[in-house]
Amino acid sequence: MAAFTSSSNRRVLLVMPYHQLTRKASEAGFRVWSLWDPELPEADLLDRVEHTSEGLLLTGFGDEAGLRRLVARTASRHGVGAVVHCGHGASVLPVVEEAWRLGLSPNPPSVIAGLRALREAPSVHGPRLTVQTLTVDGRHRVVGVAVQRTSGPPDHRVTGHLFPAPLTDSERISAESAVLELLGRSGYRFGPASAEVQLAEDGPRVLCCAPRFGPDRLPLLTQAASGFDIEAALFAALIGDEVPDAQPAQRYAEIGFFGLPEGQLLTYAGTEDIAVTPWVRGARFPYRPGDRIPPAADPRAHRAYVLVVGGSPKETQERVRRARGDLVTDIRGAADGRRQ
């Protein structure tokens, strides 16, 4: 396997990393510099990011020229061997373009732009899947396929994810093949990708494909079910270490969002009980009394979740339901001031 950076230069600039990524990069022997816009709603755990980084750099991503200068200056000052954008939004292309100009990215900007341009509207029929992949030296490997849990009609709001998706062999192969074909055509050379696929009567439709890790802690979900750590695998591949293929899942894992009503949080209880439940593999409740709870349809609401394992999709679904019931909240509604 050809490494993008060298084993002697384990210095990396991560843009919009969450703290699990900076920690795993450090565990792999990398010195990490992290770059964030502090005004982004996701930037609520920067103290943890800073703790596992050599330096935390803050700048407004709306200033594209300033962002490019900061990437170039940081790479030069610290002898960075690779620049990896871990997030989404308008900052992706400027960072990739600057990294490519500096020889610090294996993916041409046109490839990233092409993947990000893919956007198809889903239909109301057919399950929506997330196909996670890891590409090294242009070889695309499927890490796994998850299925979205939704609220059902009429809005079909995403309420969680189940891994592995309970599909027939033909459904799984067709969904994976559609994503692998897309990545092959795109010229994508290195990194994770997360594609949303809808199974329709006439075959799978790739709705979008992001050159990044899956959203909503999907890497943690996959690891809980199969043992394969795609985040750690990225940093191993970055320096040329051998990355094993993902193994079939030994169990089902499901992540469920708590789906709280919008309003101001007054009190809450039950998080300690959830955390010590034997089948819970992860949980997060990022709010404190006085915080505003976003509406359930807001992507920020996905930051409050529980992750469970079980022997069947029915069992994980029931365990998520029980965890949601264990969380007791007192929330003053935004519209009418009543507690919920």
Image (tube, rainbow, N blue to C red):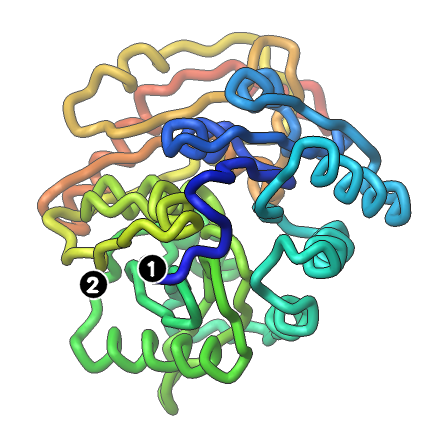
Task: Classify the position of the N terminus by image quarter.
Answer: bottom left
Could you tell me if residue 293 is visible in this image?
Answer: yes
Q: Secondary structure at mark 1?
A: strand
Image x and y of residue 85, in percent: 61, 48
Residue 147, labelled with which disc?
Answer: 1
Q: Position of residue 340 (x, y in %)?
A: 54, 21
Question: In the image, what residue type sits under mark 1?
Answer: Val
Find residue 223 and report its image quarter.
top left
Image coordinates for residue 114, horizontal then vertical, percent: 65, 74
Which residue is at a point 42% across and 73% down the rendered structure image? 198
Tell me the crowding category of disc 1: few under 14, some 14 to 19, or many 20 or more residues within 10 angstroms, Cα based: many
Q: Are marks 1 and 2 in contact (CB under 8 Å)?
A: yes
Question: Type of residue at label 2?
Answer: Pro
- Find disc 2 in the rendering and name its residue: 166
Q: Residue at x 37, y 52 (%)?
A: 240
Q: In which image quadrant can residue 262 be found?
A: top right
- Neighbor class of circle 2 (other Cα within 10 Å; few <14, some 14-19, many 20+) is some
Report the residue at 46% width, 47% height from top: 6
Front residue of 237/39: it is 237
Q: Earlier in the sequence, mark 1 or mark 2?
A: 1
Classify 208 as above or below 294.
below
Which residue corresponds to the image point at 36% horizontal and 26% vertical from the top-left? 283
Decide if residue 130 is in sight here.
Answer: no
Q: Is residue 285 left or right of residue 291?
A: left
Above or below residue 328? Residue 235 is below
Out of 142 and 33, give the one closest to the viewer. 33
Which residue is situated farthest in the bottom direction here?
Answer: 202
Mark 1 vs mark 2, CA separation in Å: 8 Å
